[in-house]
Amino acid sequence: MQDHAQEQDMSAVLASFRERILQGRPLQIRGAGTKDWYGQAPRGEVLDTRAYRGIIDYEPTELVITARCGTPLSEIDAALAEHNQMLAWEPPRFGGAATVGGMVAAGLSGPARASAGAVRDFVLGAVLMDAQGEELHFGGQVMKNVAGYDISRLLAGSLGTLGLILQVSLKVLPRPFASSTHVFEINQEGALRLLNQSAGQPLPLVASAWTSDVLTIRLSGAQAAVDAAIKKLGGTELANADDFWTDLREQSHAFFAQPEQPLWRLSLPSVAPPLDLPGRQLIEWGGAQRWLRPDGAVDAATLRAAAQSVGGHASLHRGGDKGVGVFHPLSASVEKIHRQLKQQFDPRGLFNPGRLYASL
Amino acid sequence: MNAPAQPSFAPARQREVVDALRRAVPAHCVLFDEEDTRPYECDGLAAYRQLPMVVVLPENEAQVVAIMKACHALGVQIVPRGAGTGLSGGAMPIADGVVLSTAKFNQILKMDKYSRTAVVQPGVRNLAISEAAAPHGLYYAPDPSSQIACTIGGNVAENSGGVHCLKYGLTVHNVLRVRMVTSEGDVVELGGGALDAPGLDLLAVFIGSEGMLGVVTEVTVKLVPKPQAARVIMASFDDVVKGGNAVANVIAAGIIPAGLEMMDKTSSRMVEPFVKAGYDINAEAILLCESDGTVEEVEEEIGRMTDVLNASGATAIACSQSEAERLRFWSGRKNAFPAAGRISPDYYCMDGTIPRKNLAQVLLGIAEMEKKYGLRCANVFHAGDGNLHPLILFDANIADEFHRAELFGAEILELCVEVGGTITGEHGVGIEKINSMCVQFSPAERETFFKLKRAFDTAFLLNPDKAIPTLHRCAEYGKMHVQRGQMRFPDLPRF
């Protein structure tokens, strides 16, 4: 998929990345910058990954695509669409500019996450440039691979703190033969019960969203399975369903308006009861992801205690004052491993220092 | 090669370690007489044996912590062990080390229909989870063929798969939380009850770490609804390449089968007299293609699969008409290993994974190697995910045959790496494939694996000398790192 001249260009880009790393100054690894707002505030000199781009290999019948970190997701989507395939975890595209590297580093998954899996579930391999400027290959382009530690999956959601992600191989899936979206008027408690009970039955329930006493669900799969599920669950079919799910995935849904206002993400066991918190909630992932738009000031510690008490955690996803710590504090033993990992992988603190936790 | 391993430790050291462990756990949990430790000298890869100095069988997590601290203080190395069914020698003991068996951690702590999860101890057998979940209409999806005996702790260590993993995923996709103890005695919770946990995804890297990062004390698994129906198609092909292309065509048609397995003629002729599955022994390749789901869904998908297989040149097609027939079709595939044991005194099972498009090239290469090493090889193939299990048939009583089988196996793995694959899809590296790691990974990559280990196991006491070879070892092995296909296949993109 590439010619000799392009390969030479890419070698030059890699050489420039290596040079930057070997200069030994802290780097802010950045693709299109569509998620500059995510995590703790970026620090360090910008290292722009977008020149290192292009799909290296795509084998529809192997269900694998391999691309350089700077490749825009729009390019990936276009290639997959030609073969009726998709990124099943539905990562946000942010207008299509978002890059493959940023998508993996941020580790954000979309509406289908509860049924399809997360970014980490689809990462098959990665090439990492380490703190010595070495290119390291982990995993591969095959579904099953247990040779060595699974470092490529560890990179998903690492926010670039372990090294520069140069290239990734991702498992892709065929688009479903049929999809249908239905809405139900139901309160939060009823919606959570319906979603959890349905998930325990062989139903093609792929995505869900509840807010303001309306539950929207998407059924996808074989036509016969979708038809049978509709008969069983009922509800009213939603027109323009694709727009609805895209808005949700891109956080352009009305619930997410005013991005400078604090948006909390509560990641909980799906069976956690409704949490009585001041503000509006939008619930996805069958109950496992609950967005909160607090009314007025909210105490981070109170929110975190509420999430933790039901077995989950809370992060300040967007907006608000990052001073409270964006991500949920780690337990002492987990924090120790984080610190030791960072020390081993990036002893000079070059890669996205402080982006995940201030101490890393 | 099967001679009993000899003890090789200083008696004074053994006394010192036994005394320390007896302060950590009740006396009946510590084994050190040779007749008691002998059963622990090997795992499922019986060719590699080592008598351990001490075996310890803790009964609860506090005891695991105490054992780890005692061993840490004395600098004793520990090899964790589940059911010992592993096929790569990952649980092979260390001569002057301790084997920590999780056999007494055999309780299902919680089975919850509503949240579709089970909390189990590491010594619970894989199949026992599905059996306990069955009354709720749920099951645990990964089903390695040893599932009747292998334990979930071992599955976590190896990231075990099974015949359904193209559709349902591996252990890493089906485990939500692991509680484990580090070599320093820290209790660590990875993952949790939610779909993600704060910070780095340590759970993802812990799964498949072959007992080198921590000892598992508790696991929360995801349970999924049991499909209402399942049917399997058996298709014959007069050419393995056509069979391989048929697999690609099924995927290209947008179908993800619940199971997709291929057997070559040697394999089907090997199993048919043994299990009478009704296999077409004149076919060069047999494909088993399964659909599961709701009754309506299965009917629709079976129709679609049949069309694709016919269009791909299948010479015969049969679709299971009953559950009994479905199980009979599968029985041949599932009994491939025992069948190999029936026609050959010994067999050596390899576990490479390849991009499926290179199947013909690899099978051709294996056929050449059969001549070179003077040994037969039967090939069974998890065709959906590219995981190839060549079964090298040999007789250990004939001088040199095991050695030739080992060389044959290593050459197959090198070929897998050359065509862009990997040396192990699901059995793990353990001690068996440690030299082949030198072929797949560069010195800097292997050093990074050691860095990761040091972050979890600072003192390097947990199952050291497995899975990741040292620079020294690779120098002795003398085979070069295959530079991502640059050596023999310059146009091949590889990771």
Image: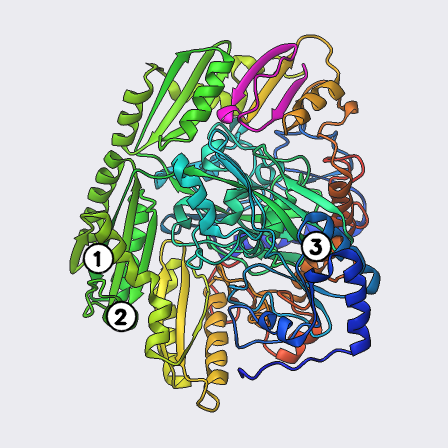
Does residue B48 appear to the left or right of A30 in the view shown? left
Percent coordinates x, y for residue A313 in the rendering: 66, 28
Residue located at (25% from left, 41% from top): B301
Which chain is home to disc 3?
A: B
Does residue B75 appear to the left or right of A80 in the view shown? right
Q: Residues within 10 Å of mark 1 (few under 14, many from 20)?
A: many
Numbered disc 1: secondary structure: strand
Dots 3 and 2 on the same chain: yes
Residue placed farthest to the left in the image? Answer: B316
Q: Which residue is mark 2?
A: B274
Closer mark to the observer between disc 3 and disc 2: 2
Residue type at mark 1: give it. Ala
| Pointers 1 and 2 in contact (C-beta within 8 Å) | no
Res A315 visible = no
Q: Which residue is mark 3?
A: B452
Residue A54 part of the magenta segment: no
C-alpha gap between disc 3 and disc 1? 45 Å
| Label number found at residue A157 | none
Q: Is residue A43 above or below residue B160?
A: above
Numbered disc 2: secondary structure: helix
Give whichever of discs 1 and 2 has the lower sequence position. Answer: 1
Percent coordinates x, y for residue B302 in the rendering: 22, 44
C-alpha gap between disc 1 and disc 2? 20 Å
Front residue (pair B199, B171): B171
Closer mark to the observer between disc 1 and disc 2: 2
Q: Residues within 10 Å of mark 3 (few under 14, many from 20)?
A: many
| Label number found at residue B235 | 1
| Magenta residues, start to end | A261-287
